[in-house]
Image (tube, grey):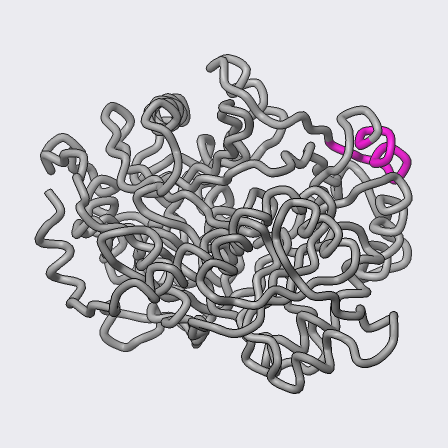
Amino acid sequence: MVNCNPETVSTDYDTSDRLYFEPLTAEDVLEIIRVEQSKGKLLGVIVQFGGQTPLKLAQALSDAGVPILGTSPDAIDLAEDRDRFNVLIDSLGLKQPESGIARAPGEARAIADRIGYPVVIRPSYVLGGRGMEILHDGAAIERYIARLSLTLSSPSELIVSDKRPLLIDRYLTDAVEVDVDCLADGKDTFIAGIMEHIEEAGIHSGDSACSLPPHSLSPEIIAEIERQTRALALALKVVGLMNVQFAIKNGEVYILEVNPRASRTVPFVAKVIGLPVAAIAAQVMAGKPLASFQLRPVKLDHIAVKEAVFPFARFPGVDPVLGPEMRSTGEVMGLDRDFAMAFGKSQIGAGTPLPSSGTVFVSVRDSDKDRVIAPLRDLAAMGFKIIATRGTKRHLEANGVHCEVVNKVLEGRPHIVDAMKNRDVALVFNTTEGAKALSDSKDIRRTALLNHIPYYTTLAGALAVTRAIAALKAGSVQVAPLQSYSKRAS
């Protein structure tokens, strides 16, 4: 095991026979491999279990004559290279959001104007979603490029170039994102788990809550997702694990990203379905046929919800709003027979006890005003009081939801932040759009965080927590060991 992160389980002394605590660079890893080869103990190297960093090393190791177990470096490059991957997607007849690659600063705005706003933009040369943003107009793109120039190590470097291109994709508004983990050996495939995100597409998959199995997708959509996953695994000649991220919009399935490696969701999937997914993948990479494991689709009579855990409270002044760049530092899981209770358990596990009564504060963007009516009606029927900013209040009362008005911070005291500090608010729904609205509402999110008030910055989160509160009020939380759920899976 080679790792340079002291916080991960792979640095535990009993995880591997030998642990090298060294930087994950081609130079350092090759030196370690030479030492292992001199001992006559190195048969090959697995790069699938460490995220994007070891994948980036695969070609350099292969060029140096190091055997890569599992998916070939060329197949890894095919999934990573935007141009090659687009050709593959077209040949399979699958769909992707419109996209483009900017290789000069002036190209970025032209590409975004062509494919339409909003867009997701990110530098191709950084990992883990860092630097990724959702932008809504050309001026925002120019500001983004200006900020990007401040991160360069040398003033002489070009901000955007052939070596430092920007990847630009059309952002699918109000789409449902889906993660799929799959095992393959080049001939056979096994879908280990299909996870439906609670937050809409655009929130980093590591920060989004998700449910396994999906809680709202139709059987037809699930079948199509399975078909596309198998087609991709076979076309890429995946040996081991593969993760695919899809977006579902208006009944259409779009491919967002394909990673020929283990994703962070593999431990979650393995616990839910009761199969040692990573161990099976390792044996497949070592040459054992997938068919020899006699894997069958797992039928679950329970549902699991993964929820992210964030470190926001430890960093004064940070805005806890979610976006394309990953910010979570851990995760928890809630298990139960239905989605609502499982989601409620996940919130409790993440340190967010849900209220059974009190006041709900609502301030949502225009595009969410119609869809927030149903959960607020449900909360009002459960005895909650609703307060809202003036624009949201007018819309709610026009649709039969009684609420009281509360001032925004900029409108003078007493305002919503005062009410939150006075413990007069038990739950916050706050969705925003655009840089100014995001900035204006930062105090609300920060105050909720510091005063341990549950807050939800996406409409999907608001819908899910409303169902969870109803479930928690209707019955008591039942606790059972993980193994009891796994035994019921078949």
Where does the N terminus fall, quadrant-wise?
Answer: bottom left
Q: Main secondary structure of the magenta part?
A: helix
- Does residue 355 appear in the picture of this structure? yes
**Above or below: residue 206 compared with residue 158:** below
In reply to whether residue 109 is colored magenta, the answer given is: yes
Instruction: State the residue at coordinates (85%, 40%).
Output: 137
Asked whether 253 or 448 is in front, the reply is: 448
When asked about the image quadrant of residue 290, the answer is top left
Lateral position of residue 96 relative to residue 379, left or right: right
Instruction: State the residue at coordinates (73%, 82%).
Output: 418
Instruction: State the residue at coordinates (16%, 37%).
Output: 288
Query: Residue 485 location, x and y as percent?
Result: 15, 56
Instruction: Tell me where the magenta segment starts and ends, as one range.
Output: 101-112
Query: Residue 373 location, x and y as percent?
Result: 59, 48
Query: Residue 315 location, x and y as percent?
Result: 64, 80
Asked whether 469 or 132 is in front, the reply is: 469
Instruction: State the residue at coordinates (19%, 46%).
Output: 280
Where does the C terminus fall, quadrant-wise?
Answer: top left
Asked whether 144 or 124 is in front, the reply is: 144
In reply to whether residue 99 is colored magenta, the answer given is: no
When asked about the image quadrant of residue 428, the answer is bottom right
Query: Residue 177 location, x and y as percent?
Result: 50, 40
